[in-house]
Image (cartoon, rainbow, N blue to C red):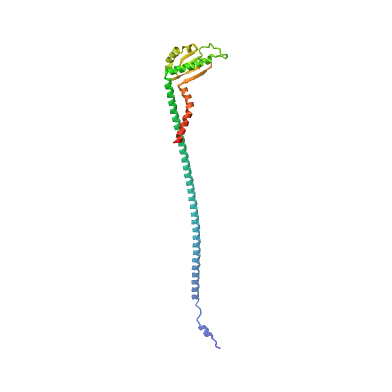
């Protein structure tokens, strides 16, 4: 059995404390580096994930805003189209109404021209006066029991100043009995064509001026004229 002596133990090499400390420091540095790299990588990954989330939110918001803008633009386009169509329909209707009114106005002028042309025929006007005055006198002359009245100045015949002389000559010449039966002839500056017969006591007037006759004819002809215009417009 061998034994070692204290000398032998002292001769063995002892651990180097400085070397151990250097190794520990290096391990610590290596560990800190590793932990720092891992932590930095984790932080980078977290930042990247957050950036992706924010980017996704921004993209979704942009898409939603774009969809809203596109929808509003579509609605605005539809409203513009509807308003344009409505405005066009209103303009077309107004133009049609204006055209109908203009045509009716021209038609009334044409009818009035024919009436005035007819009233420029002195013989026609005189015959019409005689007929109307005779009927009015006959109606006024008959009482309730058929007795004749002895009234004078029963009728007032109003004519234009230009036609007064010619009509007076007719009344005095061809129908002198009208004067004897109470027809009073009077010029009226408001008349240019035609005549008016006034029943003196009853405050009644029979208007045969060109305006009155034209208006009476238009009440009859205008509906037929408008119907004809409408039928032509529908056929177009």
Q: Is residue 72 above or below residue 147?
A: below
Instruction: Inspect this view and state whether residue 200 appears.
Output: no
- The residue most toward the bottom is 1
Q: Residue at x 48, y 29 (%)?
A: 224
> Relative to the observer, which residue lies in front, 12 or 41?
41
Residue 165 at x, y = what percent? 42, 14
Q: Residue at x 47, y 20 (%)?
A: 208
Q: Is residue 98 above or below residue 113?
A: below
Q: Is residue 226 above or below residue 53?
A: above
Residue 96 at x, y = what percent? 45, 34
Q: Which quarter of the rendering shows the C terminus?
A: top left
Residue 212 at x, y = what percent? 47, 22
Q: How many marks?
A: 0
Residue 52 at x, y = what percent? 49, 58
- The residue most toward the right is 145
> Relative to the observer, which residue lies in front, 194 or 129?
129
> Relative to the observer, which residue lies in front, 53 or 173?
173
Q: Which quarter of the rendering shows the N terminus?
A: bottom right
Q: Residue at x 44, y 18 (%)?
A: 125
Instruction: Inspect this view and state whether residue 213 appears.
Output: yes
Q: Is residue 192 above or below residue 89?
A: above
> Relative to the observer, which residue lies in front, 189 or 96?
96
């Amino acid at each position: 059995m061998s034994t070692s002596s204290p000398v032998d133990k002292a001769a063995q090499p002892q651990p180097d404390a400085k070397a151990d400390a250097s190794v520990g420091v290096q391990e610590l540095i290596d560990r800190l580096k590793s932990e720092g790299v891992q932590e930095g990588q984790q932080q980078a990954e977290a930042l990247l994930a957050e950036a992706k989330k924010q980017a996704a939110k921004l993209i979704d918001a942009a898409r939603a805003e774009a969809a809203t803008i596109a929808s509003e633009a579509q609605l605005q386009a539809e409203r513009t189209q509807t308003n344009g169509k409505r405005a066009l329909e209103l303009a077309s209707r107004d133009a049609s109404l204006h055209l109908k009114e203009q045509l009716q106005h021209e038609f009334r002028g044409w009818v009035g021209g024919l009436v005035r042309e007819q009233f420029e025929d002195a013989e026609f006007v005189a015959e019409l006066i005689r007929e109307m005055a005779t009927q009015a006198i006959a109606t006024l002359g008959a009482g309730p029991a058929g007795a004749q009245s002895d009234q004078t100045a029963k009728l007032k015949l109003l004519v234009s100043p230009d036609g007064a002389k010619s009509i007076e000559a007719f009344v005095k010449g061809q129908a002198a009995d009208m004067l004897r039966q109470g027809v009073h002839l009077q010029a009226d500056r408001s008349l240019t064509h035609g005549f008016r017969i006034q029943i003196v006591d009853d405050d009644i007037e029979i208007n045969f001026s060109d305006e009155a006759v034209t208006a009476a004819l238009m009440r009859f002809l205008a509906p037929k004229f408008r119907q004809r215009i409408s039928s032509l417009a529908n056929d177009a």
